[in-house]
Image (cartoon, rainbow, N blue to C red):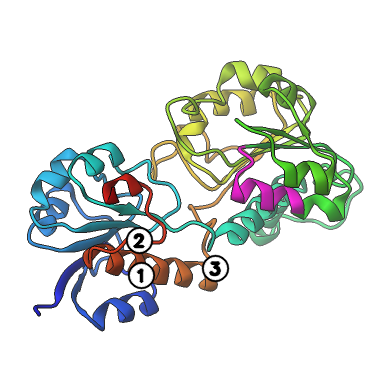
Amino acid sequence: MEPYRVYVTRRIPKPGLDLLAETCTVEVHAEDRPLSRARLLEKARGVDGMIGLLTDRIDAEFFQAADRLRGYANYAVGVDNVDVAEATRRGIPVSNTPDVLTHATAEMAWALLFAVARRVTESDRVMRSGRWMGWGPLQFMGNGVTGRTLGIVGPGRIGTAMALMSRGFAMPVLYHGPSPNPVLEQELSARRVDFDTLLAESDFISIHTPLIPQTRHLFGSEAFAKMKPTAYLINTSRGPVIHEARLVEALKEGRIAGAALDVYEREPEMAKGLAGLDNVVLTPHTGSATVTARTDMAVLAAKNLLAMMKGERAPQCVNPEVYV
């Protein structure tokens, strides 16, 4: 039997590629940058399977070009870059990589929370510049975390993990989501509240919701006006959940105390004025960037793709109706 032909749109950790290479002919985009649209469509032709990233737009045009595709594996939890309905219509299974990056991303949310609350990156810049003249009682006063109220928007896997990590800081926890979360309620006595209540009562708001039409620009001028002026916003989910230009305005005007972002509305670009603010911490989409998480994602994507190409049900298939 001829080996399956696989294309990987960006280099991923070696264990995933090694797993594919056991039974497949594998080609990997060698440059550390996204494929151009033309190149993506060109490489889609004639392959049995593809592993792609959030930067790859997988839509009807892509599926039209992918004339022999048997499965598409997204190297991410979210699939907002994939037209899953179109894939289903064409009978093509799509998979993602849940669970393996849950704790890594939750940890990143905490890193951002502490960094913005205690002004870590701001004071780091001053120290590196040589401008620090010695200790002073009014320098870099931030806000404490212990005992403050944590609001979770999107209490799924990552949101739940992030909230559970708050136990060491005796934080009351509020959450907003489409259904009750028994784990948070039993373990933390967390309260499920409406969105406005969460905005009004939280000292730290951590976003973990998927990007769907209902959550696009969920945080805009109206939401910022309802938050405490001493509150902080943390986002490790998807950039477009926040209206970035309105966030810049809110930060400049002191309507909220600060924000910490790992994702952006138009990656890799940022809204004008965001980078110049001291009350914001900015990281380049590194929520899952631990050796363990990224390697496990690669292996999981490879296992999913191998199953799909063999006509078997992928363990993390997001459109299982294709198997009916």
Q: Residue furthest bottom?
A: 22
Q: Residue at x 83, y 52 (%)?
A: 167
Q: Between residue 55 and residue 26, name the one nearer to us.
A: 26
Q: Which mark is residue 25?
A: none
The range drawn in magenta is 154-164
Does the magenta segment cover residue 158?
A: yes
Mark 1, residue position: 303
Name the residue carrying label 3. Answer: 290
Q: Quadrant for the N terminus, please.
A: bottom left
Q: Main secondary structure of the magenta part?
A: helix
Element at label 3: loop
Locate residue 115, reporting x and y percent.
70, 51
Q: Is residue 8 magenta?
A: no
- 166 left or right, relative to 51: right
Of residues 252 and 73, the one drawn nearer to the viewer in this rendering:
73
Going by the numbered disc 1, the residue's amino acid type is Lys
Which amino acid, by three-letter code, is at mark 2? Ala
Task: Please determine whether, in this image, residue 136 is positioned above or below residue 9.
Answer: above
